[in-house]
Image: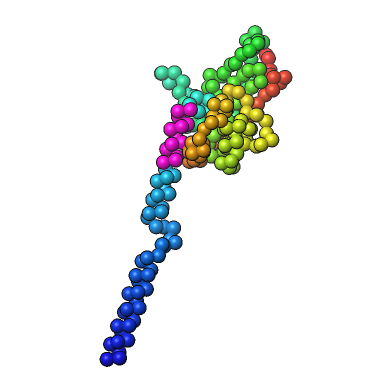
Amino acid sequence: MRKLELTAAILYLCLIFFLLSCGQVSPDHNSPYSTESEVSNEEASIERGRYLVALMDCNSCHTPKMMTEQGPIPDPARMLSGHPGDQPFTGFEKEDAPKGNWLLFNPDLTTAIGPWGVSFSANLTPDPSGLGNWTYEQFKLAITEGKHKGMENGRSLLPPMPWQSYAELKEEDIRAIFAYLRVIKPIENLVPPPIPPADLTLN
């Protein structure tokens, strides 16, 4: 009889332990609920970023072009990689040099020439030669306050980068854009530094 009572007591304690365990929140990070929720939120943010990058037409300046029967289109193999570093600016003929208030683009639209000199569109891919080592805070400072490489004491971004138009972007939109740019194909491409007006070459 005592053996039967002991067995019943053990089973009762096991049942109590089981019920208490079920009532606790598991710290397991592999829980399908938390993981699926986090993955869903991240995917939604990335998709939002993809939409915003397309809507803001970032490819027009930051993606080299390829010629098709319908004219130049963004080269999918070099998406958002900026002005090709292996295509240095070679100047232009004196008779073609614009005077006064002016703005010129190369056929790729990755090079802009104006009173500020020559500017080249940046590499926005997650390669170290692009945004690979950037923090979100740096990206936000660059896109909303026009600071080169997101450095508070850095120079201002040169035209035609329209950072003034992005200054009022919502926090969630900036994060979405950054999240998208972190997952696109990384492309190694070291964009050349800008050329000041005094150093412009006239052939």
Which residue corresponds to the image point at 57% horizontal and 37% vertical from the top-left?
Answer: 140
Figure disc tally: 0
* Front-most of residues 50 and 194: 50
In the displayed image of the protein, which residue is found farthest to the right? 198
Residue 42 in the figure: left or right of residue 138: left
Q: Main secondary structure of the magenta part?
A: helix
Residue 32 location, quadrant: bottom left
- Does residue 151 lie above or below 96 as drawn? below
The quadrant the C terminus occupies is top right
- Does residue 50 lie above or below 29 as drawn? above
Q: Is residue 124 magenta?
A: no
Which residue corresponds to the image point at 67% horizontal and 24% vertical from the top-left?
Answer: 195
Extent of the magenta region: 44-56
Q: Position of residue 6 (x, y in %)?
A: 32, 86
- Can residue 13 be seen at all in this image of the molecule? yes
Residue 43 location, quadrant: top left
Residue 26 in the figure: left or right of residue 131: left
The quadrant the N terminus occupies is bottom left
Q: Is residue 46 magenta?
A: yes
Residue 104 in the figure: left or right of residue 45: right
Q: Position of residue 64 (x, y in %)?
A: 51, 26
* Front-most of residues 90 and 125: 125
Which residue corresponds to the image point at 44% horizontal and 18% vertical from the top-left?
Answer: 71
Q: Position of residue 163 (x, y in %)?
A: 57, 28
Q: How is colour applied across the structure in the image?
A: rainbow
